[in-house]
Image (cartoon, rainbow, N blue to C red):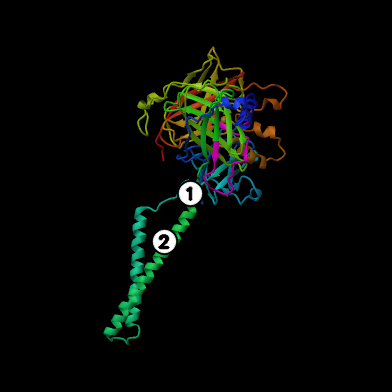
């Protein structure tokens, strides 16, 4: 990383100099804006909890959709499309699924797997459901049987309660009425017992007995009110306890620091607002070569995007020497992965003046596009004009093309295909891997409620996917494993340099209807290209 040395140097200056020497007198440090964000429910992505993945279970290619439950314990819904890979597509006779913690001792003891249901109309389509019993970092292990033997694929599933569910009004009224009836019944029984229990058959109760009954009923009423009150206290205690398990993303504070000697830099401070005890902030692991992938997206038109990689300088603290950036208010989305394989996207906002910073280096890249015009977007729907453009001219004369299928229904899995053309409009012949993959994309909704960082293997974090794959390893090398993931061709593994395709397929499904911008990054030679495409999602079919 060419600029990591520079980052730590600038930090060294900050740390050593205050209070002593001429440098410190000239050092002025000011904060322009720092806004805490975190109102939008995150987890692996922001507002996009469903998991889309494309992977190989031995000889079989599976396109997997997992819809994690909103509350834990809860049921995850799972769909698998076994992809056709030509005329002699392998016949799959059955798929079994099991939920297993991604890491820790429990990951070694998988439960008995459940069979998925094969569709009668479409033999390539399977559905299933699994109970996820605790919040945390899980995997669903798919075991496939078919004409070419068995194959295994594990897909990481971060499972969290994202809400507490209130009772439906109708059910509340019904249960409330039945409860009142029960209370009235108890009081009535107590009264009748006090008045009539010792009377011979046919005798009329004395005034004294009636009085005794009234007193007993009063006592019973007090007792029942106390019982209901204690019940309510107990229930509220349980609900409060459960609320602690509702996912709270790590919070991130973004600060711009200016010093004349070190240039403008960004400092990110991460804090845990309290959630599961097992979550830490000092256990982050590398995910496709970096501890953090930070997207800067200018609001509101999403016309400027940066994909940057801050360095960790202390647990919970990241720093980045800023490149030159146009002024504006930016949404910051930072992807990190914990040692447990649990991914999180941290969100912040930052208003910047014009930044005159360093040139872009290493894996850092930027893209410019026309602003997405909010006037063309109407609430939850969007006009077809939004999706007319499916080719994007790049600054160096190359073009990126999206094989745009038109308006897509939300919640529908799709492989988004992009290709890179050279200056002559021919398929680029110098495609290179960008951070180990053929392409990276960010799907962002126009109102900022959705952000998803997607790869050829899907929406799952690459770090978690590798953890899951390592457990299924049966003698295959790590290089084989990576090569088996789509878009992660490893030409270095063989002696002959393999030419990379100029296309990339990214599995995803829009979480809700509306207008989206898709930032797609591919690399050729030493150039990282960033294109922007606008997409429109219609209301989901179901
Ligand atoms: Cu990426």
Label 2, residues with CA under 10 Å away: few <14, some 14-19, many ≥20 = few
- Toward the viewer: 236 or 373? 236
Read off the magenta span.
269-293
Ligand 1's quadrant is top right
Q: Which residue is mark 1?
A: 71
Q: Please say if 356 is above or below 279.
A: above
Mark closer to the observer (2, 1) = 2
Disc 1 residue crowd, few under 14, some 14–19, many 20+, Cα 10 Å: many
Which element is circle 1 on?
A: loop
Does the rendering let one see residue 234? yes
**Does residue 120 appear to the left or right of 154 in the view shown?**
left
Residue 232's disc is: 2
Q: Which of the image's four quarters has the N terminus? A: top right
Q: Earlier in the sequence, mark 2 or mark 1?
A: 1
Residue 451 in picture, x, y percent from top left: 48, 34
In-front residue for pair 325/454: 325
């Amino acid at each position: 990383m060419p600029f990591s040395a520079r980052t730590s140097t600038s930090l060294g200056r900050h740390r050593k100099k205050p209070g002593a020497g001429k440098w410190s007198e000239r050092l002025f440090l000011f904060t322009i804006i720092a806004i805490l964000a975190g109102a939008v429910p995150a987890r692996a992505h922001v507002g996009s909890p469903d998991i889309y993945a494309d992977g190989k279970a031995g000889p079989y290619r599976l396109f997997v959709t997992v819809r994690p439950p909103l509350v834990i314990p809860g049921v995850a819904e799972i769909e698998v499309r076994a992809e056709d890979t030509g005329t002699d597509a392998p016949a799959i006779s059955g798929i079994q699924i099991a939920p297993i913690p991604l890491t820790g001792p429990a990951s070694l003891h998988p439960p008995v797997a459940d069979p998925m249901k094969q569709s009668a109309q479409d033999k390539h389509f399977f559905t299933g459901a699994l109970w996820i019993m605790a919040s945390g970092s899980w995997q669903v292990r798919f075991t496939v049987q078919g004409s070419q033997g068995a194959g295994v694929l594990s897909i990481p599933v971060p499972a969290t309660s994202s809400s507490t569910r209130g009772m439906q009004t109708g059910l509340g009224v019904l249960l409330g009425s039945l409860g009142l009836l029960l209370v009235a019944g108890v009081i009535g029984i107590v009264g009748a017992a006090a008045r009539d229990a010792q009377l011979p058959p046919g005798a009329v109760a004395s005034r004294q007995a009636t009085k005794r009954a009234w007193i007993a009923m009063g006592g019973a009423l007090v007792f029942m009110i106390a019982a209901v009150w204690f019940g309510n206290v107990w229930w509220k205690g349980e609900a409060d306890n459960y609320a602690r398990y509702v996912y709270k993303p790590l919070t991130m504070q973004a600060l711009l620091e200016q010093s004349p000697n070190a240039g403008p830099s960004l400092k990110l401070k991460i804090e845990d607002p309290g959630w599961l005890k097992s979550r830490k902030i000092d256990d982050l692991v590398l995910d496709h070569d970096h501890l953090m992938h930070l997207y800067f997206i200018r609001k509101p038109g999403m016309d400027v995007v940066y994909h940057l990689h801050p360095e960790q300088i202390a647990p919970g603290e990241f720093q980045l020497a800023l490149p030159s950036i146009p002024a504006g208010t930016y949404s910051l989305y930072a992807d990190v992965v914990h040692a447990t394989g649990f991914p999180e996207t941290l969100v912040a906002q930052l208003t910047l003046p014009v930044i005159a910073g360093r040139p872009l280096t290493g894996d850092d890249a930027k893209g410019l596009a026309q602003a997405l015009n909010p006037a063309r977007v109407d609430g939850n729907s969007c006009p077809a004009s939004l999706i007319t453009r499916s080719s994007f001219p790049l600054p160096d004369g190359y073009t990126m093309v999206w094989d745009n299928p038109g308006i897509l229904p939300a919640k529908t899995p799709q492989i988004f295909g992009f290709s890179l053309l050279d200056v002559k409009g021919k398929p680029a012949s110098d495609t290179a891997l960008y951070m180990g993959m053929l392409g990276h994309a960010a799907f962002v909704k126009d109102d900022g409620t959705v952000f998803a960082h997607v790869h050829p293997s899907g929406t799952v974090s690459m770090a978690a996917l590798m953890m899951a794959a390592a457990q299924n390893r049966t003698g295959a090398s790590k290089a084989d494993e990576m090569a088996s993931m789509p878009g992660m061709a490893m030409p270095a593994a063989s002696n002959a340099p393999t030419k990379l395709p100029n296309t990339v397929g990214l599995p995803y499904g829009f979480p809700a209807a509306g207008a989206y911008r898709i930032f797609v990054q591919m690399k050729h030679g030493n150039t990282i290209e960033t294109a922007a495409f606008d997409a429109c999602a219609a209301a989901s079919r179901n």
